[in-house]
């Protein structure tokens, strides 16, 4: 099964949200549509996909998500900028 660990942010890059999913396109659409009105991403207008890693094993993807969540912000920013220096929305 294909799965993804991803990082999203808001327009001002002040918030970083890290998640894991088996359907990245659908998950991004759900975040943008505000499917869960009380969610963190809805509250902070997190709607831009700035980083993702594709994997085949959900357990390793969940482990990677947990690892990234423990990192300090500076390390997360460096990871994003290594793949996406302009912080473009990668959801297209």
Image (tube, helix red, strand yellow):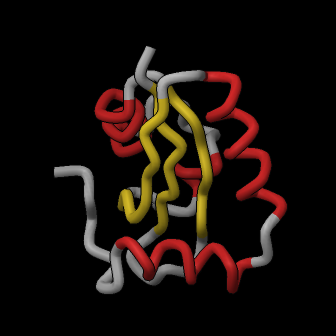
Decide: is 75 above or below 18.
Answer: below
Residue 4, x across and y down, in percent: 47, 37
Is 55 placed left or right of 62 in the picture? left
Residue pictured at 43% horizontal, 39% vertical: 54
Decide: is 44 above or below 64.
Answer: below
Residue 64, x across and y down, in percent: 69, 45
Is 72 placed left or right of 49 in the picture? right
> Which is nearer the eye, 35 or 16?
16
Q: Residue furthest top?
A: 1
> Which is nearer the eye, 75 or 55?
55
Image quadrant assignment for residue 16? bottom right
Residue pictured at 51% horizontal, 57% vertical: 7
Residue pictured at 56% horizontal, 82% vertical: 78
Is 26 placed left or right of 64 in the picture? left
Residue 83, x across and y down, in percent: 38, 72
User: In which quadrant is the N terminus drawn?
Assistant: top left
Q: Residue furthest right?
A: 70
Image quadrant assignment for residue 72? bottom right
Residue 86, x across and y down, in percent: 30, 85
Decide: is 29 above or below 69.
Answer: above
Image quadrant assignment for residue 47? bottom left
Residue pictured at 55% horizontal, 51% vertical: 41
The image shows a total of numbered marks equal to 0
């Amino acid at each position: 099964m294909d799965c993804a660990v991803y990082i999203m942010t808001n327009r001002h890059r002040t918030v970083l949200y890290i998640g894991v999913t088996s359907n990245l396109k659908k998950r991004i659409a759900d975040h943008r549509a505000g499917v869960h009105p009380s969610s963190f991403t809805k509250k902070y207008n997190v709607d831009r996909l700035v980083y993702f890693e594709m994997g085949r094993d959900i357990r390793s993807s969940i482990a990677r998500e947990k690892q990234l969540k423990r990192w300090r912000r500076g390390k997360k920013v460096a990871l994003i900028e290594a793949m996406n220096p302009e912080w473009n929305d990668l959801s297209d």
